[in-house]
Image (cartoon, grey):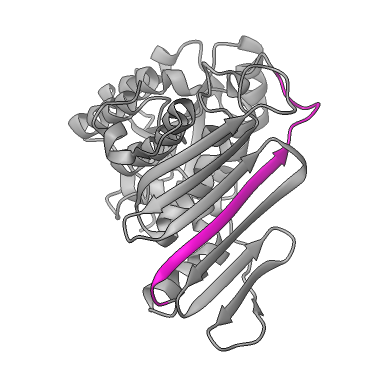
Amino acid sequence: MAQAPLKVACIGMGWWSDVLADAMKRSNRFELAACYTRSKEKRKAFATKYGCKAATSYEEILNDRSIDAVINTTPNNVHLETTRGAAQAGKHVFLDKPIANTVADGHAITEACRKAGVVLALGYQRRKESHFRWVRKQIDDGVFGKLVNAEANISRDRLGKIDLSSWRYTADGMPGGVMLQIGIHYTDVLESLMGPIKAVYGRLAQLVLPGNNPDVASLVLEHENGALSTLNASYASASEYYCMNIYGKEASAYYDLHHGLRFLKRGADRSTPVPCEKNDTIREELEEFADAVRGKGKPEMGGEASTRSLAVLRAGIKSAREGRRVEVAEILAGNDS
C-alpha cells in the first residue's frame, strides 16, 4: 500500500523556496500544507501560488501536529534557531545549504536533530547530477586508477542583478561571499569524487560588484589521499559557467556546461563524449529526504557531513584572511574565528 504524502511546511519565502516547492509539485511524495515568513505579502503570495495555508507565525506551524516536516530556506544566520525549534516540535527538517554560517552552529543543529530523533537533510543537489554520478561510478570501479588532480569553476553573472538588501550578498549574511554561496557546491562535488579535503589555501577578491563581500574566490584543496584540486568561483564573470575536470593515473573526465561530459583513457589520442541524460536533482534530494523520514535509508548529506562541508569553506575564508594554509581539522576543532 502506498504511503501518504509527507505533509510539509515551507519557511523562508525567497526565490529558492519556490524552486523547492516546484520540485515537490513534480513529485507525488509531498503535500505542501503551510508556509511562513515574516513578510505577510510574501507568505500570502506563496500560499496562493502553491495552494497552501499562510500561517501567521512559525509557532503556528510548530504546534500543528499534522505537519511532518519543515522545508527551511531561511537566512543562514537563523538556521540554528529555526531548525532547533522544528526538531523540538518533533518535525523533520530539510535545510538548504550551507548548514549555517559557523561550524559551531552546524554542530548545534546536528545535535539538536539527533537528540530529538528527527531527520536532518541538507540540499546539495550538484553532487547528484548525472554526469558526476557517472564519474563516481568509474572511480568506484577503478577505471581512473589513482586520483591525482581536479580543477573546477562555478561562475555566474550578478552584475546589475545584485540586491544589496538581501542577506545573500552581505558579509554578515553570507561570510566569504561567492565562495560560501555557490563555491560550496563544487567543493562538495570535489569531495564526493576526489575524497575528503584535508587542508585549504584560499584567496578572495572584490572586483566588480558593489557591497562589502567577495565576488571572486580561488581555492587550492589538499585531499586526504594526496590529490590536489583547484576551485574558482565568481559572480563577476560575463556569463554563467560550470566546469570540472577529474584526472586519474589511468583516465580523465572533462565536464562543462556547454559541451557536457567527455572521457579519455590512458593511451587514447582524443576524448569521447559520454551521453548523460539530465536528471531532476532537486526532486531526487527531496524524495531521498522523504524516504529517510519513512525509515528508508539516510540522507546523503546529513548534519555531520554538511558541517564538515562548511568547515572546508571556513578554512578557505580563514586562509584568505591570514595568508596561510589552514587544515579543516583546525576549523572543526573550534578555531574558526
Query: Which image quadrant for residue 206?
Result: top right
Residue 37, above or below 142:
above
Residue 252, given in percent of the width and then of the height, sits at 54, 73
Residue 141, above or below 189:
below
Query: Which image quadrant for residue 13?
Result: top right
Number of callouts in the render?
0
- Residue 1 appears anywhere in the view: yes
Residue 9, given in percent of the width and then of the height, sits at 47, 29
Q: Residue at x 21, y 34 (%)?
A: 114
- Residue 284 appears anywhere in the view: no
Q: Residue at x 67, y 43 (%)?
A: 155
Q: Is residue 325 left or right of residue 27?
A: left
Residue farthest along the front direction in this orientation: 323
Q: Is residue 143 magenta?
A: no
Q: Is residue 147 magenta?
A: yes
Q: Is residue 168 left or right of residue 71?
A: right
Q: In what quadrant of the picture does the C terminus appear?
A: top left
Q: In what quadrant of the picture does the N terminus appear?
A: bottom left
Q: Which residues are magenta?
A: 145-163
Residue 143, given in percent of the width and then of the height, sits at 43, 80
Q: Is residue 249 left or right of residue 40?
A: left
Query: Which image quadrant for residue 228?
Result: bottom left
> As rendered, which of 228 and 85 lies closer to the eye?
228
Q: Is residue 98 left or right of residue 126?
A: left
> As rendered, which of 148 and 80 lies closer to the eye?
148
Residue 56, given in percent of the width and then of the height, sits at 51, 10
> As rendered, which of 100 and 73 lies closer to the eye?
100
Q: Residue at x 47, y 25 (%)?
A: 321
Residue 48, above or below 303:
above
